[in-house]
Amino acid sequence: MADIVIGVASSHTPQLSSGVEFWPDHAERDRRNPHLLGRDAEFHSYDELLATADPDIANELLPDVFEAKYERCQEAIAALTERLAKAAPDVAVVIGDDQHELFLDDGIPVFACFAGDELVDMPPIGEALERMPAGIRAASWAAHSDHAQRHRVCAELSRHLAEQLTGEDFDITLLSEQPAHRTLGHAFTFPRYRLGLPATTPIVPIFVNTYFPPNVPSAARCHSLGQAIRRGIEAWQASARVAIIASGGLSHFVVDEELDRRVLAGITGNDAPGLRSLSRAQLRSGTSEVLNWVAAAGALDGLAATVIDYVPGYRSPAGTGAGMAFVQWEQEP
């Protein structure tokens, strides 16, 4: 029987990988964004947020503060990388969201699995690369290789989980071929490029539509999905060490420390009701990636969770930025 040996959750915001010299560039994009999800769970313009922002946020925008926060994030990533390597999983189930990378408007499933032998990361080239903002381009090494890169998939476990989840009344879209001219998304490449998951370790991508309404699942449904994933892994008749990785989050593009800390407390306290009760209104825009963490928490229920670090990455006086968090689950001694 397969055994879940470790769980890992990491933010994957470009702010983690661009260097602090590009944080002002990320902030400039915020200024042009008319749909910033505020802490009141309503959308606002940058100027609206700025008018009511805490003036003390200015203290978070000093160069030495930026640098200290960036270094903390790199140390946390290094810690997750070390622990993932020590666990030596045979396969990694990666729970993430697709952002018009593999799935476009011709079909965006609520939940999906891929049961082919590999998925290819195809980096942007030509005009697409030139159009990228400087800060996104600087961080692209954490999302894409510099060439078409093949990522092994454990098709056997993917098919098994698709069957198990369908048997538990989850409607799963199953792909066996990668659509032409589409790429594996950054939520699923980040574990390789930044968390050191070896190229020889196959992944099982679990796609959750967090970003694109109306068919966005609730937190409760995502937690139940995670529980079903755990049962499916435990029922897999293979002697395999399995890692579960949640990619994305926490709050962005407006930092919501209260929400982030509530999510982290729910994870470390095994507070399933608290995680399941997170509202749809709060989990929109970039903050919707919290749903990936909620699903992972359902799959890893019973393991001990530790917050490696939480860094509220403010990057503008209006409070925009990203809540950058790093968590590990491990078996009780």
Image (cartoon, helix red, strand yellow):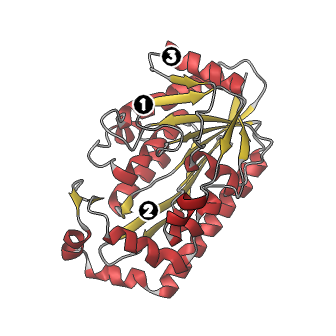
Estimate the x, y position of residue 216 in percent, counting from the top left: 35, 36
User: Which one is earlier in the sequence, the residue at label 1 or at label 2?
Assistant: 1
Residue for point 75% across, 40% down: 89
Task: Tell me the SS state at disc 3.
Answer: helix
Three-letter amino acid code at disc 3? Answer: Thr
Q: Quadrant of residue 316?
A: bottom left
Q: Which label is found at residue 110?
A: 1
At a point 50% along the width and 24% down the height, the residue shown is 173
Q: CA distance from mark 1 to mark 2?
A: 25 Å
Q: Quadrant of the N terminus?
A: top right
**Amino acid residing under circle 2:** Gly
Residue labelled with disc 2: 323
Which residue does the image show at 60% across and 75% down from the upper left?
Answer: 71
Cβ atoms at labels 1 and 3 below 8 Å apart: no
Q: Nearer the viewer, residue 178 or 281?
A: 178
Q: Residues within 10 Å of mark 2 (few under 14, many from 20)?
A: many
Q: Can the viewer see residue 260?
A: yes
Q: Which mark is residue 166?
A: 3
Q: Is residue 45 above or below residue 201?
A: below
- Inspect this view and state whether residue 301 appears: no
Question: Where does residue 166 sit, x and y in percent of width and height?
Answer: 50, 16
For marks 1 and 3 on the same chain, the one whose residue lies earlier in the sequence: 1
Q: Which mark lies nearer to you, 2 or 3?
A: 3
The spot of residue 300 in percent (x, y) is 56, 37
Q: Nearer the viewer, residue 315 or 300?
A: 315
Q: Gap between marks 2 and 3, in whole Å?
A: 34 Å
